[in-house]
Image: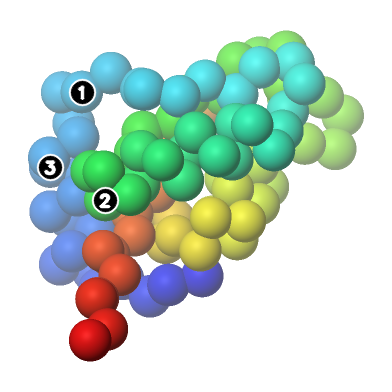
Amino acid sequence: MSKITTRMKRHVRFKLKDEKPTVWVGKDGLTSSLVGEIENQLGKQRMVKVRILPAALQQDNTAQTIAAEAAEQTGAALVEVRGHVFILYRRHKKLQC
């Protein structure tokens, strides 16, 4: 999981405050295809807003655990979890010559 400064967290929250979530976690939870889609969007835009549908929140799954698992699997920083919505951020990988 990558590190992110408090200032960068504020910036990411500000950029995405009026945006709608672009990925939804459904009743199947965090599947490999869903992780692939999050990876794809992080590669293009560096940040992604994800909504967790109530069907995905079963007995032991909370929004915080799903968000932490998504951040770990994508190598992104978890910026914020608010209700059923969370934000992930990942810096672009530097090209090596």
Residue 90 drawn at (x, y percent): 34, 60
Of pointers 3 and 1, the one earlier in the residue sequence: 3
Residue 28 drawn at (x, y percent): 77, 21
**For the residues carrying marks 3 and 1, which lies nearer the camera in this image?**
1
Of pointers 3 and 2, the one earlier in the residue sequence: 3
**For the residues carrying marks 3 and 2, which lies nearer the camera in this image?**
2
Does the rendering let one see residue 83? no
Residue 84 drawn at (x, y percent): 52, 26
Residue closest to the eye, 39 or 4: 39
Which residue position holds label 3? 14
Q: Secondary structure at mark 3?
A: helix
* Residue visible at 23% across and 69% down in the picture: 6
Q: Residues within 10 Å of mark 1 (few under 14, many from 20)?
A: few
Which residue position holds label 1? 19
Residue 73 drawn at (x, y percent): 62, 56
Labels 3 & 1 near each other (Cβ < 8 A)? no
Q: Secondary structure at mark 1?
A: loop
For residue 46, which numbered disc appears in the image?
2
Q: Give the residue at the far bottom of this rendering.
A: 97
* Residue visible at 87% across and 29% down in the picture: 59
Residue type at mark 2 is Arg
